[in-house]
Each structure stands twice: as C-alpha cells, then as structure tokens.
Image: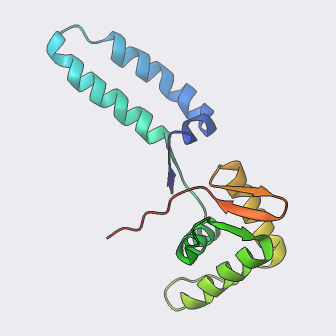
Amino acid sequence: MTIKPGNIRLNWRQLFEKAPELVLTGAGVTQPWLIPFAALYLWNLVWSLSKIEITPAQAMTMHALWNVQPATRRFSEVEALAHVNAHVNAYRDTVPAAALSAREFAAVVDDLVKLQCIELADGEVWLREWVKKPN
C-alpha cells in the first residue's frame, strides 16, 4: 500500500463518491462542541483517500530497490531488474513470487511511474517513495 497526499489526485472517483459525505458532515455541525469530532471524521475521510493498494510485484520492486540503499536511489533499468530478482530469490521461501522477466518488470515500472512512486528517465529508475517496514 502506498500512502501519500499525492494519491488523492489519483483517487478522483473515490473523492467524488466521498464529496457528499464531506459536505454533509461539515454542514451538519450545529453545535460548537461537535466541531472537533466533525474535523476528525473529515480528516479520516481525506486520509483514506491517500491510500492506494499496490500489487505484490510492485511491492517487491519497491522493497528491493529500497533495500539496496544507495544514497541517490537511482538505478539503471537493468541494474534495478537484477536487484528485484535477487530480492525475489532471497525471499522465495516466505513470499510466493517468481522472478520478473524484462517485460513484466517494464509493466511494473510503468505502473509505479503512474503512481508517482518512481521516476523513469533515460533508462534510469529513481525511487521517489519511502518504504516503511512494520516493526
């Protein structure tokens, strides 16, 4: 799952679905003591729009590139694919995933570019998103 304010732009349909709820909650506050509760409710609605589910291949790619940890987080496409497949092989016992072909990796990269998790320029992959691991 990727969570960031920029994801709200990607969730236009969900935003329009939640718009009546947002407006009615804001307009329905008639007592001053309800304002903090309405604000909390509205914040939770907006926060839920900042979450986007990603596929296991996308998650594995993000995790693999994060674990390499060069200071720049920039890789050639060939180098990035090699890191991802090495990561898949290292976790083969715990995560049922297969190594990615060049075509599959290109599709994953395209999806992650659309989600603005990475940038791709001149054959170079730049990991823009932070990866937070649960404790």
- Comparing 55 with 59, the one in front is 59
**Vertical side of 109 occupied by 44: above or below:** above
Q: Which residue lies furthest to the front in this view?
A: 71
Q: Which of 73 and 77 is in front in this view?
A: 73
Q: What is the x, y in percent for residue 103? A: 84, 72
Q: Position of residue 34 (x, y in %)?
A: 19, 18
User: Horizontal placement of 89 versus 75: left or right?
Assistant: left
Q: Which residue is drawn at 54% across and 87% down?
A: 91
x, y (%) of residue 56? 59, 69
- Position of 55 with respect to 113 (left or right) is left
Residue 84 against residue 19 in the figure, above or below? below
Colouring style? rainbow
In the figure, 59 relative to 10: above or below?
Answer: below
Considering every residue shown, the one lying at the far top of the view is 30
Locate residue 72 relative to residue 33 in the image: left or right. right
Query: Where is residue 37, by image quadrant?
Result: top left
Q: How many labels does the image show?
A: 0
Residue at image point 68% right, 61% down: 126
Q: Residue at x 54, y 30 (%)?
A: 15
For the residue pair 74 and 108, the one nearer the viewer reads as 74
Q: Which of 1 and 80 is in front in this view?
A: 80
Which residue sits at x=83%, y=64%? 123
Q: Where is residue 119 in the image (x, y as percent from the top left)?
A: 71, 55
Q: Quarter of the image holding residue 40?
A: top left
For the C terminus, the quadrant is bottom left
